[in-house]
Structures are given as structure tokens and as C-alpha cells.
């Protein structure tokens, strides 16, 4: 089960920060270090003294966590400690699955509303539908004030093979239906969308590099090739990274054999070269990669290799700038340390890690880019590394020390922003309104039959926009100024249309709907001509 997010690409700048910090780039779990379990040090010695002699009862687990966090924070921004209780959920995004009933949901007016039953999940097999409301789980009534996503997760997720009773209210038939659902393994897809932009050009959106991403990528490519694919756009915007080995597998599909993709090395890790090894599925077609300030780690490995080998055009804005590699080390209590063990270098030998030296505000560096105007004007970039590196085929100059700089810069679009749009965005009201609108107009919208027809024919009426305005006012949003409506109405209509398409056709629907107004995609189409 997944809490369905609103899909904002450019407006809420704060959401762009630190995507790379959250996932990064990982080596697969390796051999654990020897002779660490019984080592003596001052930290363990002091904790032992506290346990035996301190005046009050203390929470040793909390003290240990704070001590470990402080220790790791003095190393680098990406070495982290994950408590045992949080590790399973932290791994799910990379492992590509979780155990539960398989629904995507929103919480709206204290009601759990199902956006969709996930493909291949138990809920879909039993006939649970988009628009259904969950009103009770086992003996717990959940249609009440105070329900949260965390509470829903605890009630519906569980070990595969276990059973849970779920009562559904279906508005269309005004029925309350009881389902006994056997939990199963639910896939989490990392290839969010794939479709043709025109007769020759395909589009693939990758949200992270997880266990199954390479398989998903190949499946998407096969579908596009069946439709006449000759040129490809890979969208890595907002992609925070994942497994290094998965990223290199995808690069191997794009570059010819015996080419260096990336190499890693550290004080305690000898140099390891990742080389293309096989005939790739798309070694010769035209290629464009979309990146932005949320593209990190494994995304930068892929875009760096494509840029350094002059294989395609990099389009967007400077990437996050994370050139460190983490390796997981399991601790005795089931917790884990993800420790930085190496740096990685692109084929031209540049490390793109941005500075985290004393005196730099690493966590707020993305905000600094916004403040100094870099997202609108690349000449205002603050990176000071002027070392010249050269691409492998054309000898073009590229730089490291702060991310991958695009070949074609796309400024962040602020032309539609207004106080009214900011209020709608920060409150999540557009997503809720889109869900409610679809719930009331499902029959009419389903009558379009296909995503292509829906995208061509559906438009929000002035009456619907007035309903949104009235709904927002009732939720405490101030009545918009005419100047705000002039700036933001077209964007609001497109977002609502795309959010509805996403509920019916999932991510393919959302990204397909916004493509005509996506300046990076349009720039990619121009570059690929």
C-alpha cells in the first residue's frame, strides 16, 4: 500500500532538497568487517558507566542512537545509522517490493480513499476498485478523525500469507462490502512511465535505481521498440539514486562494449572499474537525458557516462552533486550503518561530489541555488572548481566538484507562480479536489476510453474551477486576486487534468498529460531532431 503523492515538479522548491541524501548510491551488501563486535572504545565504556552508576533511569537506546548520529555526522553527510525498526521500510524502496494488500490511497476528510488497487496485488485480484473507501480494518473503525498514513500502514501491511478483514464502502452502489484479504508481496515500480512522444521518440521516467529497475527498463524499451522507437529521452529529474550496479547495467544498454562507465576508490577500497560488457538494447539511437537539482548519485553516474562518452545530450539543470558511495554494515541488534567507503569518478576522471568541508551549509545548498538565482540563470552558479576535464570522443571541456552540468540549460519556470497557487500547493488541496472531482464524474471521464482521447478532449470548465476556488476558500485559503488567476489558471487546469489522468492510468497518465507543457521534454525533442 502506497500513500499517493501529489506530483509537483517545479513549484514547491523545498521538496527538491536533499533527494540524494535520502537514497544516494549503494554497493550491494558485502562481507561484514571482522573483529568489531568485541572492540573496546571510550563510547561503549562511558555508556557502560552510565548504565551502572547514573542517578536516574535512562533510555540507553536513545543515547546510543544520538551518539552514533553525532559520530557519523562528523564524517560526511551521507554516512547514516538506521535503527532496526526503520530498516525494513528504508530497504523497500531499493528492494522493489513490500508486503501488504496492495492499494494506493489518499486520506481525505478523515476517510481512506483508494486511488487504485496495485497491479498484481491481492486487493486487485479481489475486485477492490478506485474510489472505494476503507471504513474498517479487522475490529478497528478507521473512518474517523485522527487517521494517519502511519496508522493505515500498520493496519494493512503485514507478513505475506497473513489475513486481514477489510470493510469497503462503495459509493457507486452504496454498499458496504467485507473482504478477507491474504497479504502478499507487492512490487514497487521504479520505472514510472514509458510512452512515445512522437512516431520515433520514446520517453522513460526512472524514479530511482532499485533491485528491479534494469528489468523494468528493458521491458519498457521492448514496448517502445515495438512502436518504432528510434530516439530516446530518459528522465532522471528528481531521481535520488540507488544501487550503483543497477545504474551501470542500464548504461551498458546505451554504450558500446569495452567502455568505462565509472570507477570507485577509497582509502580502504582499491580502484574498481565498471566496464560495458555486452551488446546493449540501445547503443546507436539518438539519446537525451533529463536532469535537475534533485538528480543524484546513480543518476549522476548514468548522465556522467553519457556526457563523457558524447553519447547523448544532457538537458536540464545542474545535478545534486553526490560522488560518494555507501556500503551497508549490519549491526548485532538488526540495525544498520550505511558508511561512505569510496568516491566515484566519471569516465573523464571527474568526481562530482560537492563540498561538505567545514563552513559549508551542505543541507541548504539547494536553497542557496534558489536564492542566488542559479535555477533561472546558469551564469550565477556558485561552484568554484575550474579544473578542466575532457569528454572521450569530442574532447569537450566538462567540470566536476558540484554535479553534472547540462549541455542544454532549462531554467525553472516561475511564470505561473502566485500566492494562490502556493496556498493550493502547500495544503495539498489540488490533489484532494482532483480525487473528489473524479469520484463524482467517474462515468463521464471513463467514457473517453483511452488516455490519448482523454488528453485530447478533456478540459476543466469554468464551473469546475469555480468549484475548486469555493472548496479552497472553505478550507481556509484566501480568495484569489485576479492577477493570481491570470498567472496560474492554465497551470492549475493542467495539473488537475494530469492528477486525474494519474489516478486512472497511473504515472503514465500524469506524465503523458503534462508532456506538451514540459519545457525540458520539448528541448529534448528539438535536440534529437
Image: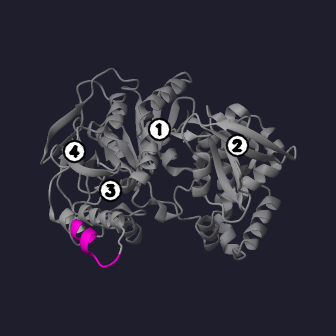
Q: Nearer the viewer, mark 4 or mark 1?
A: 1
Horizontally, is 139 left or right of 172 in the view? left
User: What number is the disc on residue 81?
Assistant: 3
x then y, percent, for residue 184: 58, 34
Horizontally, is 72 left or right of 126 in the view? left
Query: Do the numbered discs 1 and 3 sit on residues whose CB atoms are within 8 Å?
Result: no
| Mark 1 lies on residue | 96
User: What number is the disc on residue 165?
Assistant: 2
Report helix, strand or loop for mark 1.
Answer: loop
Compared to residue 237, the image places residue 477 above or below, namely below
Q: Is residue 512 visible?
A: no
In this picture, which residue range is highlighted in magenta? 48-56
Report helix, strand or loop for mark 2.
Answer: strand
Other residues around mark 2 within 10 Å, as few (<14) / some (14–19) / many (≥20)? some
In this view, the residue farthest toward the bottom is 55
> Which one is earlier in the sequence, the residue at label 1 or at label 2?
1
User: What number is the disc on residue 345?
Assistant: 4
Residue 455 lies in quadrant:
top right
x then y, percent, for residue 157: 57, 45
In depth, the one of 103 and 385 nearer the eye is 103
x then y, percent, for residue 153: 58, 51
**Mark 4 to mark 1: distance in Å?**
27 Å
Amino acid at each position: 500500500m502506497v500513500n499517493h503523492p501529489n506530483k509537483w515538479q517545479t513549484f514547491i522548491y523545498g521538496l527538491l532538497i536533499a533527494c540524494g541524501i535520502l537514497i544516494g548510491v549503494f554497493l550491494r551488501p558485502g562481507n561484514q568487517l571482522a573483529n568489531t563486535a568485541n572492540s573496546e572504545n571510550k563510547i561503549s565504556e562511558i555508556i557502560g558507566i552510565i548504565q551502572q552508576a547514573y542517578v536516574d533511569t535512562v533510555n540507553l537506546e536513545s543515547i546510543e542512537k544520538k551518539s552514533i548520529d553525532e559520530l557519523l555526522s562528523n564524517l560526511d553527510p551521507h554516512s547514516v545509522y538506521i535503527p532496526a525498526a526503520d530498516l525494513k521500510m528504508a530497504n523497500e524502496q531499493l528492494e522493489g517490493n513490500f508486503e501488504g494488500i496492495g492499494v494506493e490511497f489518499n486520506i481525505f476528510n478523515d476517510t481512506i480513499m483508494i486511488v487504485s488497487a496495485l497491479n498484481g496485488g491481492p486487493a486487485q485480484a479481489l475486485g477492490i476498485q478506485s474510489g472505494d473507501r476503507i471504513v474498517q480494518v479487522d475490529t478497528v473503525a478507521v473512518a474517523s478523525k485522527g487517521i494517519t498514513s502511519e496508522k493505515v500502514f500498520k493496519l494493512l501491511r503485514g507478513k505475506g500469507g497473513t489475513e486481514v478483514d477489510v470493510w469497503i464502502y462503495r459509493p457507486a452502489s452504496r454498499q458496504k462490502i467485507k473482504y478477507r484479504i491474504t497479504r502478499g508481496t507487492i512490487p514497487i515500480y521504479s520505472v514510472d512511465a514509458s510512452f512515445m512522444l512522437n512516431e520515433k521518440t520514446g520517453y522513460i521516467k526512472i524514479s530511482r535505481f532499485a533491485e528491479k529497475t534494469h528489468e523494468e527498463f528493458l521491458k519498457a524499451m521492448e514496448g517502445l521498440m515495438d512502436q518504432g522507437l528510434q530516439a530516446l529521452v530518459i528522465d532522471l529529474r528528481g531521481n535520488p539514486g540507488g544501487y550503483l550496479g543497477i545504474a551501470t547495467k542500464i548504461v551498458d544498454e546505451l554504450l558500446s562494449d569495452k567502455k568505462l562507465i565509472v570507477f570507485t576508490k577509497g582509502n580502504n577500497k582499491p580502484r574498481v572499474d565498471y566496464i560495458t560488457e555486452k551488446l546493449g538494447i540501445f547503443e546507436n539511437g539518438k539519446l537525451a537525458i533529463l536532469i535537475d537539482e534533485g538528480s543524484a548519485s546513480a543518476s549522476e553516474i548514468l548522465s556522467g557516462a553519457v556526457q563523457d562518452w558524447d553519447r547523448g545530450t544532457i538537458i536540464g539543470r545542474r545535478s545534486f552533486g553526490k560522488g560518494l558511495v555507501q556500503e551497508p554494515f549490519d549491526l548485532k541488534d538488526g540495525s544498520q550503518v550505511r558508511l561512505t567507503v569510496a568516491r566515484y569518478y566519471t569516465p573523464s576522471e571527474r568526481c562530482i561530489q560537492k563540498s561538505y568541508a567545514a563552513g559549508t551549509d551542505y543541507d541548504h545548498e539547494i536553497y542557496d541555488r534558489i536564492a542566488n538565482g542559479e535555477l533561472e540563470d546558469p551564469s550565477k552558479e556558485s561552484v568554484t572548481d575550474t579544473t578542466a576535464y575532457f569528454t572521450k570522443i569530442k574532447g569537450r571541456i566538462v567540470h566536476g566538484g558540484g554535479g553534472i552540468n547540462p549541455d542544454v540549460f532549462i531554467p525553472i519556470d516561475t511564470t505561473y507562480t502566485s500566492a494562490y497557487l502556493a496556498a493550493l500547493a502547500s495544503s495539498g488541496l489540488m490533489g484532494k479536489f482532483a480525487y473528489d472531482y473524479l469520484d463524482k464524474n467517474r462515468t463521464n471521464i471513463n467514457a473517453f476510453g483511452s488516455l490519448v482521447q482523454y488528453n485530447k478532449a478533456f478540459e476543466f470548465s469554468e464551473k469546475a474551477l469555480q468549484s475548486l476556488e469555493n472548496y479552497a476558500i472553505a478550507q481556509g485559503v484566501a480568495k484569489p486576486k485576479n492577477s493570481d488567476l491570470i498567472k496560474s489558471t492554465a497551470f492549475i487546469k493542467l495539473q488537475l487534468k494530469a492528477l486525474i489522468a494519474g489516478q486512472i492510468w497511473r504515472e503514465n497518465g500524469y506524465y503523458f498529460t503534462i508532456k506538451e507543457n514540459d519545457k525540458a521534454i520539448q528541448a529534448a525533442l528539438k535536440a534529437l531532431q
